[in-house]
Image (cartoon, rainbow, N blue to C red):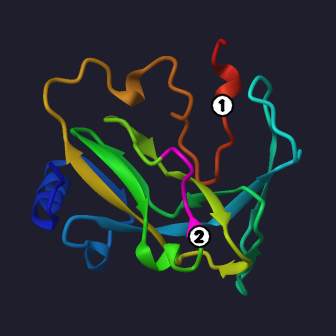
Amino acid sequence: MILSDKRILEEIEKGNIIIEPFNREKLGTNSYDVHLGKHLATYKNRVLDARVHNEIEHFEIPKEGFVLQPDTLYLGVTLEYTETHRHVPFLEGKSSTGRLGIDIHATAGKGDVGFCNTWTLEISATQPVRVYAGMPIGQLIYFSVEGDIETFYNTKGNAKYNNPTTKPVESMMWKNKF
């Protein structure tokens, strides 16, 4: 079940959902709009290897914006820091973003109960498009969880994305054993 606007507000009041900064005007009927932070990153190497630490280079989006190019994976970050203690957060692109040919995540749209951080975005563009820090980039949707949680994400010893950050985070696939 997806939470409605009133239920999202109730859960914020209870402290089960935290969104910072929170702006009531960004609350939709059953979602909350998130915005592109000022940092983007790209991988240093064109060929990535799942078994090694692929390093990234961070840069700030200038005031005049930055033109995303096709065939390049950009890592972005949400302006908003979020915590979700009783619900499963899903990050989806906004239709206006999609209509510009921008995808904001390749596979990682679902968060875990206990996720406490900004969201790293896996941004790709179908054609050159200029983006700006602070522009609406996606929306968070919250689903109810049935049953008790045994281990929250923020308490997992092997969670790879627990360190709070305001910058995009590269893939930590290399930390897996395979």
Q: Residue at x 69, y 81 (%)?
A: 130
By secondary structure, the bulk of the magenta-drawn segment is best described as loop
Q: Would you say 169 lies left or right of 1 here?
A: right
Q: 118 above or below 86?
A: below
The amino acid type of the residue labelled 2 equals: Ile
* Outermost residue to the top: 177
Between residues 169 and 68, which one lies in front from this camera angle?
68
Tell me if mark 2 has few (under 14), some (14-19) or many (20+) residues whose alpha carbon lies within 10 angstroms of its own.
many
Q: Quadrant of residue 49?
A: top right
* Outermost residue to the bottom: 64
Q: 46 above or below 139?
A: above
Q: What residue does disc 2 label?
A: 102
Q: Quadrant of residue 155?
A: top left
Q: 62 above or below 1?
A: below
Write the start and end of the magenta stretch as one range: 102-108
Q: Would you say 57 lies left or right of 169 here?
A: right
Q: Would you say 18 lies left or right of 129 here?
A: left
- Closer to the chain start, of discs 2 and 1, is 2
Between residues 76 and 70, which one lies in front from this camera angle?
70
Q: Residue at x 59, y 74 (%)?
A: 101
Q: Residue at x 27, y 64 (%)?
A: 31
Task: Kindly indicate whether the residue at mark 1 contacts the one at mark 2 (C-beta within 8 angstroms).
Answer: no
The amino acid type of the residue labelled 1 equals: Met
Tell me if mark 1 has few (under 14), some (14-19) or many (20+) residues whose alpha carbon lies within 10 angstroms of its own.
some
Give the distance between the C-alpha atoms of the residues marked 2 and 1, in whole angstroms: 24 Å
Q: What residue does disc 1 label?
A: 172
Determine if the magenta segment contains residue 162: no
Q: Would you say 62 lies left or right of 142 here?
A: right
Q: How many marks?
A: 2
